[in-house]
Image: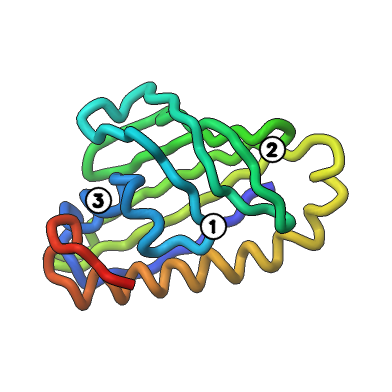
Amino acid sequence: MTLNANILIEQPADVVYTFISDYKNDWKWRSLHMEVPNYDNNTKVRVNRSIKNFHLLGLMKNGSYRIIDDQPYEQISSRINFGKLTITDTRKIKCIQMGQTELEYNLKFTLHGIFKLFSPILMPDLKKDIIRDLKWLKEILEIFPSPHTSPVEL
């Protein structure tokens, strides 16, 4: 099952990519929070790290992620594994015109076991979360001129 959403951001593609490709920024704009310890942006490709604090169905899950594709200033994809749940997170950017960037955000869920039963219930809410998260991301990036260098206090 795949969820997709797009948003137009009034910032140059390099600013958008720099922010969204740094997974340490996810807590600033994503409603599904993951703590990514010891993440080094200089070694993004084939990184595998433990993830804590991923809440699904009110439960804490431990898992791992791996960057599976990094095409600077075009897209970055990661695969996140939580036992019987695998999520492929792809963030694609496209320069529409100078200072205007489209972000396409895709989450592909591979569900096994009991998670398959919950997918019809979870997916509509997750879609709403993604749309809300992208609107929040747009607001952050358009309000703060250089969000990857300026801390955002939420």
Instruction: Point out the frontmost of discs 3 and 2.
Output: 2
Tag 2's secondary structure? Answer: strand
Q: Which residue is mark 3?
A: 17
**Circles 3, 2 touching at the beta carbon (< 8 Å):** no
Instruction: Point out the frontmost of discs 2 and 1.
Output: 1
Give above or below for 47 relative to 133: above
Q: Which residue is mark 2?
A: 85
Position of the C terminus by quadrant:
bottom left
The quadrant in which residue 141 appears is bottom left
Mark 2 or mark 1, earlier in chain: 1
Q: Position of residue 47 (x, y in %)?
A: 38, 25
Q: Which residue is mark 1?
A: 32
Q: Amino acid at mark 3?
A: Tyr
Q: Residue at x 38, y 22 (%)?
A: 46
Q: Position of residue 57 (x, y in %)?
A: 74, 56
- Near-viewer residue (112 or 57): 57
Q: CA distance from mark 1 to mark 3?
A: 20 Å
Q: Residue at x 40, y 30 (%)?
A: 67
Q: Position of residue 126 (x, y in %)?
A: 63, 62
Q: Amino acid at mark 2?
A: Leu
Tag 3's secondary structure? Answer: helix
**Circles 1, 3 touching at the beta carbon (< 8 Å):** no
